[in-house]
Amino acid sequence: MIDRLAIFGATGDLAARYLLPALAALRAAGCLRDGFQLIGASREDWDSHQYRGWIADRLDRHGSFYPADARRAVAASAHYRQADVTNPGDVAAVVAGDDPIAAYLALPPALFPHVVTALYDAGLPTGSRIVLEKPFGEDLASARELNSLLAGLVPEQAVFRVDHFLAMTTVQNVLGSRLANRVLEPLWNSTHIAEVEIIWDETLALEGRAGYYDRVGALKDMVQNHLLQLLCLVAMEPPITLGERDLRDRKVDVLRSVRPLTDYDVAHRTRRARYLSGRIGDRAIPAYADEEGVDPRRHTETFAEVELELDSWRWSGTTFRLRSGKALGQDRKEVMVRFRSVPHLPFGHEGEALPNVLRFGLEPEGLTLDMMGIGSRARAFTPLSLTARMEPPDLPAYGQLLLDVMRGDPALSIRGDEAEQAWRVLTPVLSAWERDLVSMQEYPAGSDGPAPRPHKGEQRPRSDLLHPEALPGDLP
């Protein structure tokens, strides 16, 4: 168990809203020992006293539901070092000491290579760990370069490429529901499932994140990491155990099986858009291009949708649709599994027998099965919904992630080859969008998003398929 945590970017929004409350939750649950030390590193010209006051204020704002003594203990454990994360000497001073340390890079991905190189030069005590926030790299090439740097610093099992979605109990329930219930697993294949939609639609707009978001966009911010991770849990083969090797091997198998996208596929299977001005409830939302901190020339998308197919025995013929958008009219955060229609109805009926739909609610938590029954009139179909609500988790997602880091359990983090495969899947989309092969649509803030584009043309023939590891440069 590691008792030292260094946060680079310790005064940022991620630390304030998520990491500090997570530490308070761990302290309240008895998971942090009395000797725990928090080292905050950032550019502000502060001392430890000022930093502790800032922590107390942020915990009052974002973690007030945790006991006051737990919040005070987190603040009391903190020390502060002013640091330029691109300066090797500053980085070395932050991690100095003989005991193992967990170095959490709560920073923009462009800074990761600088900090990792500085950590390598400084040398880390044996048993130390590195934690990197998503997105891991900015493209396939940078992800490979970063993996190479990390390999020279610590063992792969000491690298935690964290995605807090994986620690959400509702997300883990996607895997648990399939594997712990015999009634589902026999149906979990393309014979019975027509399509799967993985959706994260938000009413939130930028909310002050333009400096980060305008350089990333919806595809990199949500689809490349969070939604592809959900795809892995939905589509993976049952692992032998939930240990880090078995679980992550099966996730990589899913990403390797994603059929490579050609330019034709990108043009017909993806959409991108950004919001115009509008209203969401009582809020007036300016157009994305007019938001403070946005450079309209970047053509950054606030809505992204990608349709994927898997070349595997289990999933050939099932469509997987990944979608995320900002400033939409309602929050919709779910995994929706749509089953195929029954092959034959043996009796006359009134009304339409709709396909069964299994919905995993992510926020709020829940599980719903939409099915058909017979209504009050004989042979008249009526929709039925069976709904279950989840018990609240013992720890918030970031609390579970930090606990895994300190205990050294990487099962819920992303392995190096997995991060590269995720970039491989979406590199053709990024390339085609940069060349404007897919037009930028627009939608009013507060609406349902851009109008769906009708699919035209035929599916490409099977003879066009390439090996799953083929890179975009190998595409015809």
Image (cartoon, rainbow, N blue to C red):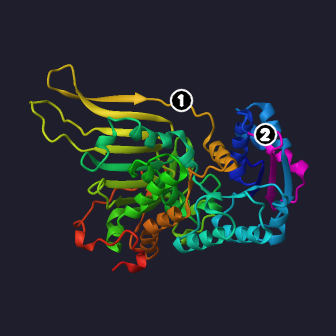
Looking at the rendered structure, which numbered label has been put on residue 33? Answer: 2
Is residue 476 positioned above or below 453 on the image?
A: below
Q: Which element type, helix, strand or loop, lies under badge 2? A: loop
Q: Quadrant of the C terminus?
A: bottom left
Q: Nearer the viewer, residue 436 or 170?
A: 170
Taking the spot 12% from the left edge, 35% from the top edge, the residue there is 345
Q: Nearer the viewer, residue 432 or 206?
A: 432
Q: Which residue is mark 1?
A: 391
Residue 408 in view in this figure: yes
User: Which kind of residue does numbered mark 2 sit on?
Assistant: Arg
How packed mark 1 is, by other alpha carbons closer than 10 Å (few <14, some 14-19, many 20 or more), is few
How packed mark 2 is, by other alpha carbons closer than 10 Å (few <14, some 14-19, many 20 or more), is few
The CA span between labels 1 and 2 is: 27 Å
Question: Magenta residues, as a range?
Answer: 32-57
Q: Is residue 384 left or right of residue 198?
A: left
Is residue 314 positioned above or below 299 on the image?
A: above
